[in-house]
Structure formats: structure tokens, C-alpha cells
Image (cartoon, rainbow, N blue to C red):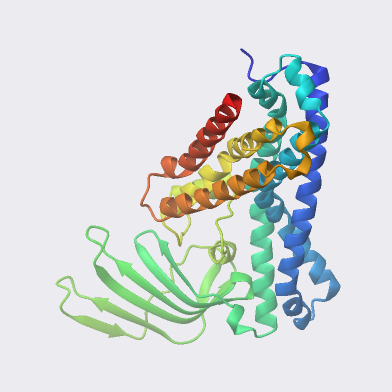
Amino acid sequence: MRVLPSNPTLLQVFLKPLLTKILLCCGVLTALLEILALLDDASTILDRHLGISGLFRYIGLHLPTLIVEIMPLSVMIGGLFTLLQMALSSEIAVLRAAGLSTLNMFRYLLPIPLLLGVICMAMQLWVIPPCEQELNRWWNEGATQANATDDLHSLWFRLGTDIIHVETISHGGRNLSKVIFYRRQAENGNLAAAQYYENLVHEGGHWVNHGIARQLTVSNEQTQVQLSSEPPPPTLTASPQEIINMTLQGVYYTPHQFWKIFSGKVPSNLPRSNYLMALYATLMLPVQMAVMLLITLPITYIPPRAGLRNPLPVYVMAAGLGVVILQGMISALGNSGSLPILIAISSGQIVAALFGLAWILRMEEK
């Protein structure tokens, strides 16, 4: 049996209104979220004298992230409105009388969420990371020029066996203040030395210290220390872009950047589980879209004469929001390492799909 049907007439009946309503819902919800984001940040942008061009730059760089984040909910709402309109206009009743089952109806609807899922997955991997990274760098440079110290991040990260702390990152990652290197022994992880640099500036492809520098060396027996005012030059191999990327509030990386993180070629400030969760969640987007559409199928059981007095659309909306909350809670367990990554990524979608199928079977019995 084919997963996707090939009847062109029925495909047009289902797919055209579904795609239209999903895109309409996505546009409205994205605009609302963008307005809320601007309410928080517009005053800061204008105070930094970035002008109207700064507002448009902020919107343009932030827009792809909002579109991908809101798309699963848009699929659910668009599917709900499409099926509700078809049910109230007796189209569903006519299709059922012609022998079309609910699951076959889902097969005709399925190409749209799968297509949107693949598009969003491509955006998440190749479009959003450059946009979010550039937005973060631009925001940091604006905060530096405006002396907005509250917007300048501090950072802890790992580089090989070393742990590094940076008190302040400014000038788009090119200037690091009060940097401490905690050198550890590779065999047991014990502290071997600590190096302090007052101000590291990226010049000519290397990090150069401007200011005070100190080194504290620990003996092999871990019982004595030696303080030196002339430590070696800093051995920080991370680029300014890699430094500023680690201050992002989320995990936004391209496949190549993920590979460099997993292979240890670049520094990282999060546990490995966080990067795996972000990568696998992106690959699961087509499945998530399909599950969100599956939850809306009980709408097809609304009698045409019942009209909008039937509470079923409210139940479907509540179920969709419940799935989003459930997946968020399970993802938090995966990020913390409390659950295996594959279980944390897939369990929410499996539970939602089983719930949707059970709901449909229950409606079939009535």
C-alpha cells in the first residue's frame, strides 16, 4: 500500500486549502511573535542609535527562527480550520459516503506537513544558524559601543582538557576581559596550572594579551603552588566567531559546526547531550509536523448540523498545546542527560501519535 496517494483530484481538494491556511496561520502568529520581540528590544536598538535600519536588521535576522518555531503549531491550527470547514460544509460526509476512510484522508493531507517539515529542517540547519550568529555578534558590538555592560556576557567553556572562564566578551568576540585558563592533567583531570590574562585582543589571527598576566603552577603532589608574573602567551585557538557563538541563548549550528564540536576541534560550553538534542530535534521536524496534523483528525467527526457549538475544536487545540508542553518537558530531561537522546526526542511524538490514533478509533465506535 502506498503511503502517499496519487489521486490528483482529491490531492487538490485537500492540499490547496490546507497549505493556504497553514501559511496564513504561520504569517499571523509569526507577526505577533515578532511584534512582542520588538516590544522588548526596540527601545534598546533605538537607544544605541541604530535607527530604523537597526530595527529592520533585527527583524530580518530573527524572522527565520520564529517561522520554524511556530510552524508545528501553524500546521495544527491550519489543519483544524481546514477540516472544520470541510466538515461543516458536508464535504467530509460526502467523501466518507464515497468510501474514503479517516486514515486515507490523513494520507491525502500528509504531503503538506512532510514538505513543510523538510523545508523547516533545511532552514534550521543552514539558514537559522548564520542569522542567529550574526544577530548575536551584531548585538554584542552594539552593546560594546553603547557601553551597555549588562548585555555583555561572561562565559565558561571547554577547550580540550582545559576549562576557560571569560568575565566579559565585547567587540563581537574580538575582545576578552579577565580570562582565566584552568589547565588540567589529561590522565586524571587534576588542576596543573591557572593562567590569568587581563585583556585578550584578537590581532593578526592570534590572541594577544594587553595588561596584567599571572600564572599559578601546582606541583605534581598537589601540595605546593608557585606564582609567576610572566606566563607563556595564551594558547587560545578559538576564533572570535566561535567565542561569540557560545554566548547564544540556544543551540544554532550548521551541520559542519556540529561536526567540529563533536570531534573536539572547537570549544564548547554545553554538555554533549544538548548538541545532540538540538540536532535530532531538527531531524524530527517532518515527523512532528505529521503528528500535529494527526491530532486534528477528530474534527472530521463533527456532524454538519452541529456547527460551531460542538466543543471538539477546543479539545483538539488543548491536545495540541498539551503535546507541545509534553515534548518540552521530555526534551528538558534529554538536555540534562536524564534520558537517552533518542528516547527523549521520539517519546513525545510517539505518545502524541498513539493518543491521536486512539482518539480516532474511539470516535469511529460512536
- Identified at 45% across, 48% down, the residue is 262
Provide residue 60's location: percent of width, then percent of height.
78, 59
Query: Which corner quadrant of the image does residue 311 belong to?
Result: top right
- Total labels drawn: 0
Give how far across and how far down residue 157 sits, in percent.
44, 65
Instruction: Establish if 164 lies above or below 268.
Output: below
Q: Nearer the viewer, residue 89 or 278?
A: 89
Q: Is residue 80 above or below residue 230?
A: above
**Residue 310 sits above or below residue 67 on the image:** above
Using the rendered view, name the quadrant where residue 62 is placed: bottom right
Residue 72 is drawn in which quadrant?
A: top right
Question: In the picture, which quadrant includes the N terminus?
Answer: top right
Most extreme residue toward the top, as rendered? 1
Horizontal relation, residue 12 to residue 100: left or right: right
User: Would you place residue 114 above or below residue 37 in this image?
Assistant: above
Tell me where residue 215 appears, x and y as whole percent: 34, 80
Is 31 positioned to the left or the right of 236 in the image? right
Q: Residue placed at 75% from the left, 34% from the top?
A: 83
73 or 359, which lies in front?
Answer: 359
Q: Quadrant of the C terminus?
A: top right
Residue plotted at (68% across, 29% down): 110
| Residue 65 in sight in this render | yes
- Counting from the top left corner in percent of width and height, residue 137 is at 65, 67
Can residue 126 be seen in the rendering of this structure? no
Q: Which is more toward the observer, 347 or 63?
A: 347
Residue under the image location 69 percent in, 69 percent down: 138
